[in-house]
Image: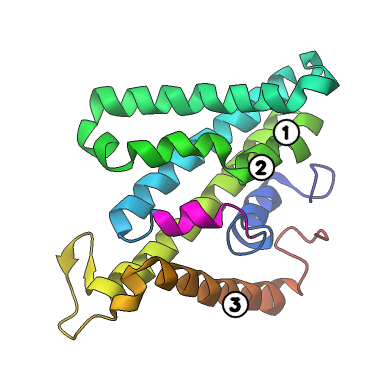
Amino acid sequence: MSTANDVSYTGLIKNGIFGENPVFRIALSLCPAVAVTNSLKNGLLMGIGVFFVQVLANVSVSAVRNFIHERIRLPAYILIIGMWVTAINLLLEAFAYSVYKQIGLYLELIVAFAIILSRAELFASKNKLIPSLFDGIGMGLGFLVALVSISFFRELLGSGSLFGVSVVASKPVLLFALPAGGFFAVGLLMGFFNWIDIRFFGGHGASGAGH
């Protein structure tokens, strides 16, 4: 995993999207990535929710890292993540209830997303606030890009539509609308991101740091 000493702030963002993309490169949180990507709308909304939680959790952990005892650090990080998930849930329920009804259950599961907790432990707890902010932005964008890519692929091929609007006249491939098709789509996109890493970054990730 990269640290602030390895990369620039721009490198941290590129690293989250390409070098250590949470889904396509590190293969974390695959089940929720498949569960919510049967439509582009759900994938986009879930990705935005994870983005905000990732950024806020990183910043919060970095800000209080010197006050958290080593023995209770993981429960403390989970409490911080849970606080931000609850806040976003309440805001959605109050101001965007239709969205909350569609993805509220999945948003609550963000507390257990491995990528958010892992970045709190591996990066935010060891770095200052600004690098942690950019790491959170990079990882959050990486997860958002992954969910949008998967859901675009699945809805277009599995339903012949985007955002619920029909765009393909031919018969859809129903496999991609099923969970098995979700994992198949993830596998194909993983291969594509690996190709990008090898082609443009020499197989060492966008940050230039080793994995």
The answer to whether 178 is drawn above or below residue 112 in the figure is: below
**Contact, mark 2 vs mark 3 (Cβ under 8 Å):** no
Which residue is depicted at the point 23% across and 72% down? 159
From mark 3 to mark 1, how far is it between C-alphas? Answer: 29 Å
* Residue 123 shown left or right of residue 14 in the figure: right
Q: Amino acid at mark 1?
A: Ala
- Residue 96: % across, % down: 24, 31
What's the residue type where badge 3 is placed?
A: Gly
Q: What residue is rendered at 44% in x and 24% in y? A: 86
List x then y, in percent, for residue 161. 21, 69
Side of 124 where 209 appears, left or right: right
Label placed on residue 135: 2
- Residue 77: tell me if it is visible: yes
* Label 1 CA crowd tier, 10 Å (few <14, some 14–19, many 20+): many
Dot 3: within a 10 Å radius of its alpha carbon, few (fewer than 14), some, or many (20 or more) residues?
few
> Which disc is residue 191 wearing?
3
